[in-house]
Amino acid sequence: MALTFAKLKLRTLRNGFRGRPAKILMFVLGLLGALFYGALAFLLFLAAMTAGHDGLALAPAYGGTLLALAWLLMPLVWFGVDETLDPARFALLPIPKLVLLRGLLVGALIGVPAAATLLATSGLAVGAAIEGGPAAGAVGAVGVLLGLVLCVLMSRAVTSGFARALRARRTRDLAAVVLAVLAASLGPIQYAINSGAQSVGMDRLESIARVLGWTPFGAPYVVGQDAVAGDWAAVAGRLALTAAVIVLLAWWWSTSLESAMVGSAGDGGGSGTGPARAGSPTARFFRRSRAPRTAYGAMLVRELRYWLRDARRRASLITFAVVGIFLPVMLNVGPAAGDKQLPMAVQLLTMVGVGTLASVGIANQFGYDGSAYAAQVVAGIPGRLELRARAMAYSWLVLPVLLSVVALTVVLRGHPAELPAVLGVPLAAYGTGLACCLHLSVWGAYALPETQNPFAINTGTGVAKSLLAMAAMIAGPVLAAPVFLLAAFGGPVGSALALPVGLAYGLGAAWLGALTAGDALDRRQPELLAMVTPKR
């Protein structure tokens, strides 16, 4: 049965690539990147096992822990999980839950992230075999395989748990808060490690590594060292700990399988909550909104409703809110600030990045619609009008967060006179980034899988998402460079002019982007619909 699921996964991937050269290109780029970084990590782990250096010897514990945490958090905040084998499509088949669980696990192991992880951690097994012989190498290989299964199960169990919570309206906000906390913990963990490495000696680092080696994150990657040292009791204990955690994670994942299989498989990943009740706060908000009774007003209200109700869109807003607030705090009061404040030019450059990041959420705005975008095509809505309404609805929700980041930055720096520059630069960057993302949403859209899991992606989609974000993060700051140069090097006059110039510059860039991208949208509506429609 596991072999059947593996064949099904490979055949589904092959059919998904058929007739889509862009998706094939994204997959190849992702595979090349995974091979490159996997090979570097392989060499690092191999050196840690064979070099005999005290510092490198800590790499299995620390590196394995970071790798496991990446599998735990990155699917939630960036890459998502590959659900080529959607559990909902097995709802009508008489497959026992245990068999389905094993098959889905095999399907999850067939992918670029799992292959890169296996390549990277194989250096531990090879190094153990070189240092301790075949027995130590076999133990290291068992630890590597158990670690891979642990990482995959963690990502599946956590994303499935959050997906189930996001489908329930009463727990959606709580799940969003927990997700934000998990995302925000990446930065503090990194800074804590850097600060700890600088402030403590090798003895303290070794004691921390010993603790990490007895956690589920680091245990499977340290057994090779124990086998080389001949500590077979520690080998048995770590392997037993890892196996017990794998069983618990498998049980947790199995509890969400039935929830994922409820309803039709092609429901578009909706929340399942139905339309807003007439007396609900959401309904009252839209009933009292002063949007014009025109096609533009209807599009504006519809997009606002989607951004407030769709779990996938809400997840992208959470990512920006966490990163946007985290950056100014860490740059002004964290370890990066040091004893002195950062120069004004560096601070403004950071605000350029925050303003551009705020616009990335609409880089695949048509992908959220999926096949439902056909209604727009049939209705014949002009592209300029549609993009203006979409950009305005998105800005209505994002700009308050961006202004809060600006206010927080000014308060932390303690220089109110910097407000015009600190506010004008991110507004200009947001406008230029918005213009770039409007074009990216028309020319570089990609389909999202039809599933109830808001974190699910298709194979190759993670690379496409990253490339779109990178393109916006590069083009947006370049286009906003004049306002940045005016505010950073124009003296008091340039700092004072940064706000009106940045506001006008950003509005002009967004207007021009909606104008030109709207014309392209009118010409590419059928092609765009084909790009965002999932292939079954």
Image: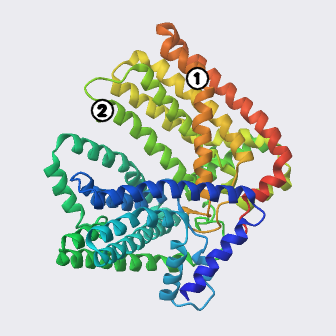
Residue 283 at x, y percent in the picture: 61, 54
Identify the residue shown where x is 75% and y is 67%.
18
Which mark, residue 333?
Answer: 2
Q: Residues within 10 Å of mark 2 (few under 14, many from 20)?
A: some
Identify the residue shown where x is 27% and y is 60%.
61
Residue 293, visible in the rendered structure = no
Identify the residue shown where x is 51% and y is 33%.
353
Query: What is the image's colouring?
Result: rainbow
Residue 462 at x, y percent in the picture: 58, 56
Give the residue type at disc 1. Answer: Ala
Give the residue type at disc 2. Answer: Val
Q: Which residue is mark 1?
A: 481
Drawn side of residue 502 relative to residue 244, left or right: right
What is the CA distance from the residue labelled 2 to the residue labelled 1?
Answer: 27 Å
**Quarter placement of the C terminus:** bottom right
Residue 98 at x, y percent in the picture: 47, 87
Residue 213 position (above or below residue 525): below
Which mark, residue 272?
Answer: none
